[in-house]
């Protein structure tokens, strides 16, 4: 298998899904993954894009066996470094009469488009153009010797049915009459186009299967014809063309604009565009776990046929079946991505979440031992979707409230609350055993003996310690805070609230 992105900017999340499906397919069959860079279009090259793509897969845990930055025996793996290799195969096609040289300028092509409705450079029009099929060989050689720029076009013969045996879509049949004579090579930069480079690279790198996006399906018949032209039919890869990722709402394919509009990332990592200076959010910086992103993407267009939704990467490898991929596009349900992240939050150990939360705690000026951070995580992680959401929800564990929520004060702080909280503080101060269990036992007995309403007492107690009417069990909070801090907060509330 291979994944071959172009270094033209940030890696779209649809490209990540394509790479993931290639990875699952390869690993399930004991195969290997090649990482190749398609950089034959130098005008679209963006500095930093290649490094960004590699770092994205490193974060996601998708490992390649060979390729750019990984090494291997089939290099070089950047297409821009393989000029001499491609030229050999261009010449082979020319010598066999399977391709021809064309000198048409952009202006001449534009004029022909104006002259011929729905113009296409093909078997019906090629003999009207300025190319080696219509010019004497001596003239062609002279132009080349004079340094006149040219392209090499593949000669598509009309009247053929081209079969693409797609692993998702079955037998796709295209008539060669609708195909144009694609440009395979440009003398201007001595580089091939995508069509030739991929065929040659896939053959030389012994690629046996190619999973790619639906947008490449129209080029598949040409690739079949190229394999045939080289006599490589026996080594032609099996193709699978994945359905598009669609907008969460409305119609059409998912775009960055949809993410900007609805507030979700469409890139794995944050991307800083070196040309515009624009910064685009990434799943990593948004706080997603890589495992959650992988799980979410795996189910966008593929279904295991069971009710199971949570899969480890190893489970995905064992259960993935390319034939169970949908032919229809998959809506990008970003809310489901949040759900996956919450589920992985629950699956992860308290220690792992605490190690991620501790820097946030420290960044807010709080110096707490890791064990205390872990205790807070244990109480609160089921209430959040992302680690970054923990601090606003549970900062009260580390920093006492300096003000009290007005709405909660009006609702929960009764006329007798100062007296009741003073009594509660005296009771708690008398306890030698400040464990959660002993606090609960003693306070419940006191509430019953005094005839107080438990809800009124607990609501006022929570407001005093937390500053708002939310949080875990009250004795979980007070046991964590300890006697001294609990009493300090209680007495401050009595002195402050309503004054």
Image: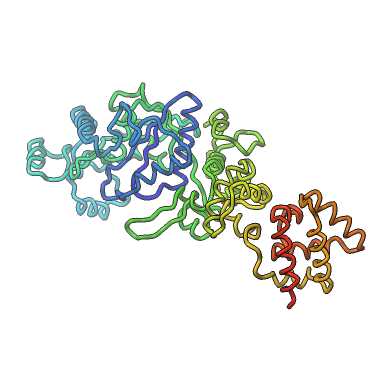
Q: Is residue 389 left or right of residue 34?
A: right
Q: Is residue 249 left or right of residue 492?
A: left
Image coordinates of residue 97 in percent, x first then y, are 21, 30
Which residue is more in the foreground, 290 or 358? Answer: 358
Image coordinates of residue 230 in percent, x first then y, are 28, 26
In this picture, is 76 found above or below 382? above
In this picture, is 177 found above or below 272? above
Which residue is more in the foreground, 393 or 132? Answer: 393
Q: Is residue 170 left or right of residue 98?
A: right
Image coordinates of residue 287 in percent, x first then y, are 53, 51
Image coordinates of residue 370 in percent, x first then y, are 59, 47
In this picture, is 249 found above or below 167? below
* Residue 179, picture quadrant: top left
At 71% across and 69% down in the image, what residue appears? 492
At 25% across and 43% down in the image, what residue appears? 125
Which residue is more in the foreground, 289 or 131? Answer: 289
Quadrant where the N terminus is found in the figure: top left
At 38% across and 55% down in the image, what residue appears? 272
Quadrant where the C terminus is found in the figure: bottom right
At 50% across and 56% down in the image, what residue appears? 259
Q: Is residue 210 left or right of residue 144?
A: right
The residue sitting at the top extreme is 234
Q: Is residue 170 visible?
A: no
């Amino acid at each position: 298998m291979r994944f071959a992105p172009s270094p033209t900017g940030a890696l779209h999340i649809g490209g990540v899904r394509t790479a993931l499906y290639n990875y699952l397919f390869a690993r399930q069959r004991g195969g290997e993954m090649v990482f190749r860079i398609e950089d034959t279009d130098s005008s679209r090259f963006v500095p930093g894009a290649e490094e960004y793509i590699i770092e994205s897969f490193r974060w996601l845990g998708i490992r390649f066996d060979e390729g750019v930055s990984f090494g291997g025996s089939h290099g070089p793996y950047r297409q821009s470094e393989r000029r001499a290799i491609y030229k050999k195969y261009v010449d082979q096609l020319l010598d066999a009469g399977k391709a021809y040289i064309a000198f048409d300028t952009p202006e001449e092509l534009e004029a022909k488009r104006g002259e011929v409705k729905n113009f296409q450079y093909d078997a019906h029009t090629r003999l009207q153009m300025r190319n080696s099929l219509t010019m004497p060989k001596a003239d062609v050689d002279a132009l080349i010797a004079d340094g006149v720029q040219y392209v090499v076009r593949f000669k598509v013969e009309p009247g053929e049915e081209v079969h693409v045996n797609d692993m998702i879509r079955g037998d796709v049949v295209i008539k060669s009459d609708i195909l144009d004579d694609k440009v395979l090579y440009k003398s201007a930069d001595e580089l091939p186009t995508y069509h030739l480079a991929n065929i040659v690279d896939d053959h030389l790198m012994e690629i046996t299967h190619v999973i790619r996006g639906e947008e490449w399906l129209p080029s598949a018949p040409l690739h079949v014809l190229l394999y045939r032209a080289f006599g490589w039919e026996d080594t032609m890869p099996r193709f699978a063309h994945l359905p598009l990722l669609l907008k969460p709402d409305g119609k059409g394919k998912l775009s960055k604009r949809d993410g900007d509009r609805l507030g979700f990332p469409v890139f794995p990592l944050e991307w800083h565009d070196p040309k515009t200076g624009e910064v685009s959010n990434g799943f990593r910086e948004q706080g997603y776990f890589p495992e959650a992103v992988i799980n979410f993407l795996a189910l966008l267009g593929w279904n295991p046929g069971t009710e199971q939704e949570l899969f480890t990467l190893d489970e995905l490898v064992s259960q993935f079946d390319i034939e169970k991929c949908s032919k229809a596009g998959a809506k990008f349900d970003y809310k489901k991505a949040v759900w996956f992240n919450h589920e992985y939050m629950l699956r992860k150990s308290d220690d792992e979440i605490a190690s991620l939360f501790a820097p946030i705690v420290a960044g807010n000026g709080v110096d707490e031992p890791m064990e205390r951070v872990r205790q807070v995580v244990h109480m609160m992680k089921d209430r959040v979707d992302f680690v970054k959401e923990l601090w606003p929800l549970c900062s009260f564990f580390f920093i006492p409230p300096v003000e009290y929520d007005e709405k909660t004060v009006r609702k929960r702080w009764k006329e007798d609350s100062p007296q009741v909280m003073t009594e509660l503080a005296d009771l708690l101060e008398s306890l030698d055993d400040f464990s959660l269990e002993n606090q609960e036992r003693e306070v419940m007995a006191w509430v019953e003996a005094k005839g107080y309403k438990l809800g009124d007492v607990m609501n006022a107690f929570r407001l005093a310690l937390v500053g708002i009417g939310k949080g875990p069990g009250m004795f979980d909070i007070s046991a964590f805070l300890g006697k001294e801090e609990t009493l300090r907060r209680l007495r401050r509330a009595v002195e402050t609230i309503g004054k």
